[in-house]
Amino acid sequence: MPIRSSVRAFTVEEAPDKSRKSVMGTKEMLPKIDKSGRFCSPRAARELALLIVYAACLEGSDPIRLFERRMNARREPGYEFDKESLLQYNHMSFGGPPVTTETIEEADELLSNDEKESEIEAEVLSAPPKLVYSKLLLRFSRKLLVAVVDKWDSHVLVIDKVVPPNWKNEPAGRILELCILHLAMSEISVLGTRHQIVINEAVDLAKRFCDGAAPRIINGCLRTFVKNHAGNPSESKQDQGIPVQV
């Protein structure tokens, strides 16, 4: 499916991190699943919206149309989705600095765990959205995409003022980071979600999918945006069933 290639394109290549293994084994950090066996955490909706915006930028297409195309895509004959992969998928699995191991066996084990995580991630993120996300989250993701499209041009001007010069000099290499900024700024300014929540979520997305100083830079950019461009955001909007709690 089209999203698979885009997902793997921006997954950070790194040495396995011991902290990731411990997180995967923590029950409290597992994604929230509803009674139908689908994701029901707003974190999953934001991640889906980010993947769509990123893929749309790579294709030069409209994010909303791409979202609808994925929603209505026919399943390949014989395709079956393993719902158990949802329980193993971890939205809080972050990258980290390279680690050293004392034995070849330990290194092999860490590499094996990392490969399993990548396989689960590819399986979940390439599956038909209706099999993975609750109806509420799909509505929320679409609202985020509509907000991004609506504010894209105005936020391009804002982003140009708040990002560091090296990001502006290499925009093609910072597409994912810029997508995170667009998504967060649009959620704050259009959906009215509390900016503290949005900034934390954006930083976590950057930790998960970006490299280097991106999380710190995105945090600073969004705080500058809130201070200088977003006015005084309301605490949150509870209308239309938008889930704003993390």
Image: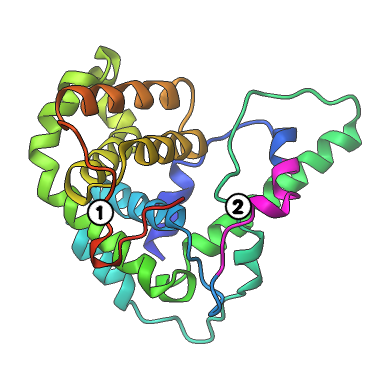
Mark 1 residue type: Lys
Q: Is residue 155 above or below residue 2?
A: above
The x, y position of residue 205, in whole percent, is 44, 40
219 relative to 113 in the view: left or right: left
Label tally: 2
Label 2 secondary element: loop
The residue indicated by pointer 1 is 237
Q: Please report the bounds of the magenta region as a residue range.
A: 21-33
The x, y position of residue 137, in whole percent, is 38, 65
Residue displayed at 76% across by 47% down = 112
Residue displayed at 28% across by 50% down = 53
Label 1 secondary element: loop
- Which is nearer the N-term, disc 1 or disc 2? 2
Q: Magenta segment: does it hold 162?
A: no
208 relative to 185 in the view: left or right: right
Name the foreground residue: 14 vs 94: 94
Q: Is residue 152 above or below residue 63?
A: above
Q: Give the crowd class for mark 2: few <14, some 14-19, many >=20 residues within 10 Å.
A: many
Q: Quadrant of residue 105?
A: top right
Q: Is residue 151 above or below residue 102?
A: below
The x, y position of residue 199, in whole percent, is 37, 35
The residue indicated by pointer 2 is 90
Depth check, mark 1 against mark 2: the one in front is: 1
Mark 2 residue type: Asn
Check contact, mark 1 vs mark 2: CB within 8 A.
no
